Image (spheres, rainbow, N blue to C red):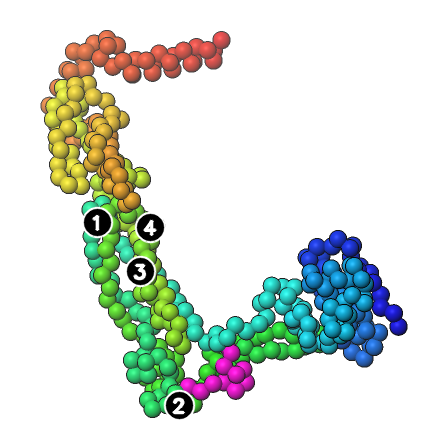
Amino acid sequence: MSKRDYYQVLDVQKNASEDELKKAYRRLAMKYHPDRNPGDKQAEDRFKEAKEAYEVLSEPQKRAAYDQFGHAGVEAAMGGGGGGGFGGFGGFGDIGDIFESVFGGGFRSGGNRGAFRGSDLRYDLTLSLEEVVAGTEVKIRLPTQVVCSTCDGSGAKAGTSPTTCRRCGGHGQVRITQGFFSVQQTCPTCRGTGKIIPEPCRACHGNGRVQEHKTLSVKIPPGVDSGDRIRLSGEGEAGNNGGPPGDLYVQINVRPHPIFTREDNNLFCEVPISIINAALGGELEAPTLDGRIVLKIPTETQTGKVFRIRGKGVKPVRGGLAGDLHCRIVVETPVNLTPRQKELLREFEKSMGKSKRHSPKQSSWLDGVKKFFEDISK
């Protein structure tokens, strides 16, 4: 029986690209594969035909010979032979291999998969504002999984050693076929380690790891803030079956400060002063994180006045100039007055009369309120 044109077999144009050829072959192979059509001789023939066509057209030299001389040219180039059997071509020997190619190769075992990286750990560390601004070094103690010193991580009793899992041959994966699907799963016998431990170590019960507490010194760089993380490479849990250890992440939390609040690299605080200092002016000691400073209060200072002290904030953790300290003035109304003090205040109020120049903001506000009600009544 004469052979059909290979381009017709794959249902592609003569200028089809390599990707178009591969896509067409996969579609036909999935449709006519013998695993999917058991006992169907016609489907088997169509599968062989598509396989042969793809073998020729996917190789540049064979395709050139076929385009010029047809089937005769291909047979001459192949030494008189035709297409191969089910298992000898293109990596598509069974339906599982077709799935592997279509979905990107996720079904094949890549060797012994028994070595697992250890888990990452998190440690919440609470520090004071002073500590994170200046930087410090603290010691932390945490529970973790470490390599068992008795069996050196093998999980086997002294004098014995793990053996290769017979079911998966040490790969940690087994192929399971269900109908026309063929996939790989973790070996249920060795649980993916590829090894069996006939006599487990008594110290770790065959796990290869034991739980211990360890103490670490953590350097806190100046300028860190709540939410920042410090990564300590290799200080997490020990790996399993010879795998690398995980990492430790130290999560920074900063306790609220009784005086200062922080926004980015700036510090803020409120400075209460008496009405006498606010009216007459003077000097006042104000706190910073590295000592005290003297604020010069000008006369007639009002609540809300902000004094900015450059460089007294927080130095950025990645370097650069430190932020600023912002001191907000709050004029405090006197409380717990004696009768005599109240009398003096009333005399002081009378001395100012009804002049607006002593309370310009109050006068301006009252004028605005008066105008507001006048506009409503119109």
Callout 3 amino acid: Leu
- Above or below, 64 against 362 in this view is below
Give the CA separation, mark 4 to mark 3. Answer: 13 Å
Callout 4 amino acid: Asp
The residue indicated by pointer 3 is 232
Give the CA separation, mark 2 to mark 1. Answer: 50 Å
In the shown orientation, is residue 40 left or right of residue 337? right
Q: Which mark is residue 228?
A: 4
Q: Which residues are magenta?
A: 162-172
Quadrant where the N terminus sits is bottom right
> What percent of the width, then of the height, locates residue 48?
77, 72
The residue indicated by pointer 2 is 199
**Local crowd size for mark 1, using a 10 Å CA cut-off: few (<14), some (14–19), many (≥20):** some
> Can see residue 51?
no
> What percent of the width, then of the height, locates residue 52?
75, 69
> What percent of the width, then of the height, locates residue 365?
34, 16
Q: Residue at the location (32% across, 73% down)?
A: 146
**Local crowd size for mark 4, using a 10 Å CA cut-off: few (<14), some (14–19), many (≥20):** few
Of 294 and 319, the residue lying toward us: 319
Callout 1 amino acid: Gly
